[in-house]
Image (tube, rainbow, N blue to C red):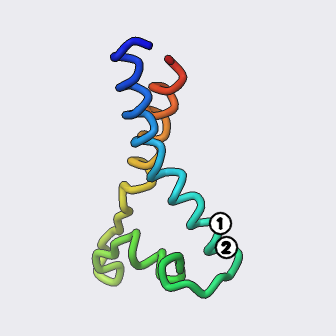
Amino acid sequence: MNSKNWWQQIIGVILLIPPIVSVLFFFLSNLGLDWKFVQMRNLSCEWTAVYGYDQGGGGGMSAAPIYLGLMAIAGAYLIKEN
């Protein structure tokens, strides 16, 4: 096996681990398990930002889902090429 392909596979797996774990925690949270680590009850206030709606302000959203999606695409692409 070529050393370039070996490193691509390792980097691909490293890029795939966070998205897979986040999807696993999402499913565990939907099952209603009462684990402190996988609770997503405060998802709206932790992943979004409110900038004074009462004063005409807007809101914001975390870029974490976009980053996780891009990591999954890059990791799958690197593994697929081997």
Q: What secondary structure is found at the residue carrying circle 1? A: helix
Q: How many marks?
A: 2
Q: Residue at x 39, y 12 (%)?
A: 2
- Taking depth in this image into account, of 33 and 4 the one nearest to the observer is 4
Amino acid, disc 2: Asn
Which residue is tagged 1?
Answer: 27
Q: Are marks 2 and 1 in contact (CB under 8 Å)?
A: yes
Question: Going by the picture, which residue comes out furthest to the front?
Answer: 1
- Residue 12 position within the rendered picture, expressed as x and y whole percent measured from the top left: 43, 33
Callout 1: few (<14), some (14-19), or many (20+) C-alpha neighbours within 10 Å?
A: few
The disc label shown at residue 55, or none: none
Q: Residue at x 41, y 18 (%)?
A: 5
- Residue 7 position within the rendered picture, expressed as x and y whole percent measured from the top left: 35, 26
Above or below, 54 against 68 in this view is: below
- The part of the image, by quadrant, that contains residue 46 is bottom left
- Residue 72 position within the rendered picture, expressed as x and y whole percent measured from the top left: 48, 40
Above or below, 32 against 13 in this view is: below
Q: Residue at x 61, y 87 (%)?
A: 34
Which residue is tagged 2?
Answer: 30
